[in-house]
């Protein structure tokens, strides 16, 4: 074998079938579509919705429940969720009826919901931040806190301050140690 540097290198070419190229192109197109959809979803939020999200995330939980510390709702939920992903979403607080004639012209309330899952427990916290026509205005208020446990049973909490106890309580129905039976000795 000649080790001279002036010797041209040979390249090996592999034949690729049309089917393989089609699959590669399809996968690449799918990835581009997903990236484009994610970008469009973030850019589709209007200014009012972005302000609503920021307002809800930065509200002090002590203003929603006086038993809680002066930390933002975002910090509080990140702490209580143990770092789980939290999904933030703007909604109409469930106020729209679905009937266009009734909903047209009505100034629906604007809420921000935050939901996450921790240890097989789903949590939803909803805070009102204003209305869709006026935008984020007024003092944010707690609308509801819902918790759904591993058994699928859902219930509401009266206060946001009850959430830490709810998330850190032992699972219901866990077996306990049986009491030591008292025996009588026969003489």
Image (spheres, rainbow, N blue to C red):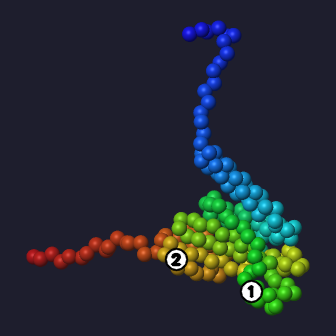
Give the percent coordinates (x, y) of residue 32.
72, 53
Give the percent coordinates (x, y) of residue 152.
52, 77
Of label 2 and label 1, which has the lower sequence position? 1
What distance separates the C-alpha of mark 2 from that of mark 1?
27 Å
Please state which of residues 82 and 130 is positioned toward the viewer in this rendering: 130
Q: Residue at x 82, y 67 (%)?
A: 45
Q: How many numbered marks does the figure carry?
A: 2
Give the percent coordinates (x, y) of residue 15.
59, 36
Q: Is residue 108 visible?
A: yes
Compared to 83, does 17 lie above or below?
above
Q: Residue at x 61, y 81 (%)?
A: 156
Q: Quadrant of the C terminus?
A: bottom left
Q: Which mark is residue 134?
A: none
Compared to 19, does 179 lie above or below?
below
Locate residue 83: give its quadrant: bottom right
Give the percent coordinates (x, y) of residue 114.
69, 70
> According to the image, label 1 marks what residue?
98
Q: Residue at x 70, y 53 (%)?
A: 29
Label 1 element class: loop
Compared to 67, does 2 lie above or below?
above
Please state which of residues 43 and 144 is positioned toward the viewer in this rendering: 43
Is disc 2 in contact with disc 1, using a CB cutoff of under 8 Å? no
Q: Residues within 10 Å of mark 1 (few under 14, many from 20)?
A: few
Q: Quadrant of the N terminus?
A: top right
Please state which of residues 132 and 34 is positioned toward the viewer in this rendering: 34
> According to the image, label 2 marks what residue?
152
């Amino acid at each position: 074998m000649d080790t001279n540097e002036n010797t041209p290198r040979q390249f090996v070419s592999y034949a690729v079938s049309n089917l393989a190229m089609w699959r590669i192109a399809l996968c690449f197109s799918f990835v581009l579509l997903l990236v484009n959809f994610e970008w469009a979803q973030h850019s589709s939020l209007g200014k009012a919705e972005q302000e609503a999200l920021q307002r809800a995330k930065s509200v002090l939980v002590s203003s929603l429940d006086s038993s809680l510390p002066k930390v933002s709702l975002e910090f509080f939920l990140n702490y209580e969720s143990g770092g789980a992903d939290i999904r933030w979403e703007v909604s109409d607080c469930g106020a729209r009826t679905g009937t266009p004639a009734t909903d047209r012209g009505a100034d629906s309330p604007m809420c921000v919901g935050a939901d996450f899952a921790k240890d097989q427990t789903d949590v939803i916290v909803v805070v009102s931040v204003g209305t869709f026509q006026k935008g984020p205005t007024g003092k944010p208020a707690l609308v509801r806190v819902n918790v759904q446990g591993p058994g699928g049973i859902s219930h509401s909490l009266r206060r946001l301050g009850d959430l830490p106890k709810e998330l850190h309580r032992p699972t219901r129905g866990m077996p306990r140690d049986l009491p030591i039976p008292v025996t009588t000795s026969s003489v």
